[in-house]
Image (cartoon, rainbow, N blue to C red):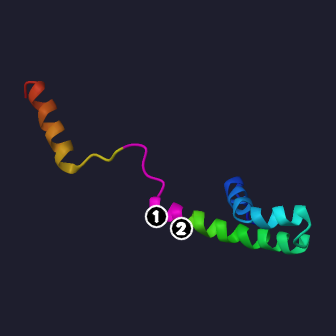
Amino acid sequence: MIGVRPTTVLAAAAVSAPALWQAYEGTLPVTTALLRFVIAVPVAALAFGLLRALVGTGSRTPKRRVADSEAHDRGSAAGRGN
């Protein structure tokens, strides 16, 4: 079974909060409110997955460009007196 992240559950609870509140007040059947929550969980997971795909994780260390590394190598070679 695939684990669900806590942020996904919180987002699903936020989306289905009106239905959950109406079930608490008794104006909506509890099964209907829970069904809306259960439907909101995969929708929130897909939304966060799409956001993660668009934003990406990024790299913690910047990659050096080839021109920068060549200039660095030339500068260090000149400093050694070669």
Where residue 63 sits: x, y (%)?
32, 47
| Residue count near mark 2 (Cα–Cα under 10 Å), binned few <14, some 14–19, many ≥20 | few
In depth, the one of 4 and 35 nearer the eye is 35
Which of the image's four quarters has the C terminus?
top left
The answer to whether marks 2 and 1 mark residues whose Cβ atoms lie closer than 8 Å is yes
Q: Is residue 8 above or below residue 73?
A: below
Residue behind mark 2: 50
Residue 1 lies within the magenta run: no
Where residue 5 sits: x, y (%)?
70, 56
| Residue count near mark 1 (Cα–Cα under 10 Å), binned few <14, some 14–19, many ≥20 | few
Residue behind mark 1: 54
Helix, strand or loop at label 2? It is helix
The stretch of residues the image draws in magenta is 51-61
Residue type at numbered disc 2: Leu
Where residue 7 sits: x, y (%)?
67, 54
Give the alpha-carbon distance from disc 2 to disc 1, as whole Å: 6 Å
Q: Is residue 76 above or below residue 36?
A: above
Helix, strand or loop at label 1? It is helix
In depth, the one of 71 and 53 nearer the eye is 53
- At horizontal 12% and vertical 37% (from top left) the residue drawn is 74
Residue type at numbered disc 1: Leu
Q: Is residue 26 left or right of residue 14?
A: right
Which of the image's four quarters has the N terminus?
bottom right
